[in-house]
Amino acid sequence: MQALARSLAPLGDRILVRRAAKETQTAGGIILPSDTSKSPNEGEVIAVGPGIKDVSGNLHVPTLKIGDAVLLPEYGGSKIKVDGDEMYLYREDDIIGKFS
């Protein structure tokens, strides 16, 4: 029986992000232990919600799109697992910026 891959479609103004891999070696070649390296604040947008409606009913579409590289806050987001991959859900307002 073939395993079905699940996909997650965020609701509202939520953005699904995969954080970048932790650095295990510095630019000078020093290898860092895994417990001392902190979580990176960069990630890639995997899925984007349709947007959120304001009081008057106008839809505000998110400015981010799939594949964008983003700067994330140090804390926050909802940690989830989709098909064994660890990802985070953020509101668009919580994402600090987009790399160009």
Image (tube, rainbow, N blue to C red):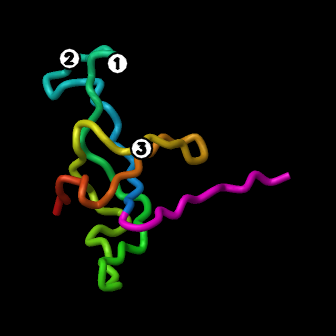
Residue at which label 3 appears: 78
User: In the structure shown, which secondary structural element does the residue marked by tag 1 occupy?
Assistant: loop
Q: Where is residue 16 drawn, in percent x and y?
A: 41, 55
Other-residue count near label 2 (Cα within 10 Å), few / some / many at <14 / 14–19 / ≥20: few
Rendered residue at 18%/53% (across/down):
96
Residue stretch rendered in magenta on the structure: 1-13
Q: Where is residue 82 drawn, in percent x and y?
A: 56, 47
Q: Where is residue 92 drawn, in percent x and y?
A: 29, 61
Q: In the figure, 65 relative to 1: above or below? A: below
Residue at which label 1 appears: 34
Rendered residue at 23%/37% (across/down):
74
- For marks 2 and 3, the one nearer the N-term is 2
Spatial distance from mark 1 to mark 3, Cα to Cα? Answer: 22 Å
Residue type at mark 1? Ser
Is 31 included in the stretch rendered in magenta? no
User: In the structure shown, which secondary structural element does the residue marked by tag 3 occupy?
Assistant: strand
